[in-house]
Image (tube, rainbow, N blue to C red):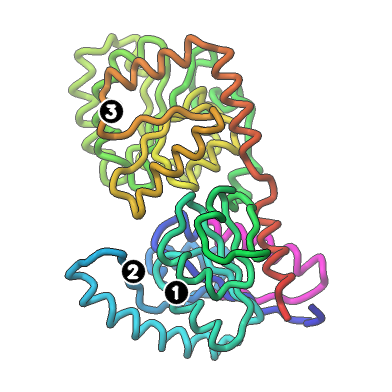
Amino acid sequence: MNKTKIKVLVTGGGTGGHIYPIIAVASELKKLSINKEKQIEIKYIGDSKRYKKVLEKNGIEVGNILGSKLRRYFSIQNFIDVPKFIISIFQALWKVHLFRPDVVFSKGGSGAVAVVIAAKIYNIPIIIHESDSVPSLTSSITARYANVIATAFASTLKRFKDVGDRGVVIGNPMRNNLLNKKLSQGDAKKSLGLDEKLPVILVIGGSQGSFKINSIILEALPDILQTSQIIHQTGDKNYHNVMREFNLLKAKIHKNIAGRYRAFPYLQNNINIALSSADIIVSRAGAGAIFEIAAFGRPSILIPLPGSANNHQLQNAKEYSKTGAALVIEEKNLSSDILVEAIGRLLRDKSKLAEMSNTAKSFYFQNSALNLAEITLSIIR
């Protein structure tokens, strides 16, 4: 790579699970370019209306194309999305031609297939990254065109065809602002105004929240608050309903312990403090959530989202739980009694909690974003 200016095209979208890893890799690409005394230009092309401001705030120019959902099953929506997909290929061909990137990094998701196909037509090197233990349809399609196939879980590579020496297990790239702001558990509890002597249960139902998990937590509050404190990310849309229910519940909770419950719509700015403070994390099983939990070395109870594409959250949870770092409760089996019993059992077994914490830490891949950035630059012709 002898170029004085490097152009990197990134793509992927639909959720924060696609966008935030892109931002993490882009950040490392910029650092590497400075170290190598090279100029770098990073542009995003995909379906990113929801995250446009976030990408631009992180110095990534945005070019939108139509998004379309690829389905493995019959749906009337296919009659709408297939034409949108065809249009998106022509959009991608034009925008990729105008940018003329040296390499393409794809995180999968809406719009990514069209961009990768365009890159292949123009003979541009391609690296893809799959976060989940089960490859998405997007990753399964784009893998055939990729020079490098990177995965978060070791088992994922076995699910791709004809990987050969293109495969690398690298973990899941994470935001530096999350990892650089770890606190001791005591300091984190102090920062949140919590009792340092009481265990903290952190509840995260995904960035959008979970109605089911919210409901179960509210049912379990009178029991959990007897021994623990709760930090609850409800999701923006659910926050007011949760607080309304909590205010009604207060009649059943002794006033001396009601203050042990803290609800937040979204913990974006304080998630590192919340993760640092937790003794146990109750969470959905998206890859992003699992690797963040592992990075902070926290024991967890995972409740996979039923009906997720390819049932990937259940597969993620099973794969991660094999290490011993987490318990898995499927939503169909979830009740307040079962959750209270699981939390109580873990809190009573200090050695088990310590073992789960150590196992979680060992599962985490350090420098995943940096390694992905280095590989991305290494395949430039």
Q: Is residue 170 magenta?
A: no
Can residue 338 be seen in this snapshot? yes
- Give the residue at x 55% y 48%: 155
Quarter of the C terminus within the rendering: bottom right
Q: Is residue 14 above or below residue 380?
A: above
- Give the residue at x 31% y 64%: 72
In front of the other: 114 or 134: 134
Residue tagged 2: 70
Q: Is residue 28 magenta?
A: yes
Residue tagged 3: 334
Residue 243 screen position, x and y as percent: 25, 31
Q: Is residue 287 above or below residue 228?
A: below
Which is more N-terminal, label 1 or label 3? Answer: 1
In front of the other: 377 or 221: 377
Residue tagged 1: 113
SS at circle 2: loop
Quarter of the N terminus within the rendering: bottom right
In the rendered structure, which amino acid carries the disc numbered 3?
A: Leu
- Residue neighbourhood size for the residue with mark 1, other residues' Cα within 10 Å, grouped as few (<14), some (14–19), many (≥20): many
- Give the residue at x 22% y 24%: 247
Can residue 26 be seen in this snapshot? no
In the rendered structure, which amino acid carries the disc numbered 2?
A: Leu
| Tag 2 and tag 3, C-beta contact below 8 Å | no
Q: Quadrant of residue 68?
A: bottom left
| Tag 1 and tag 2, C-beta contact below 8 Å | yes
Q: Quadrant of residue 59?
A: bottom right
Q: Is residue 19 above or below residue 154?
A: below
Q: In the displayed structure, does residue 14 sit left or right of residue 240? A: right
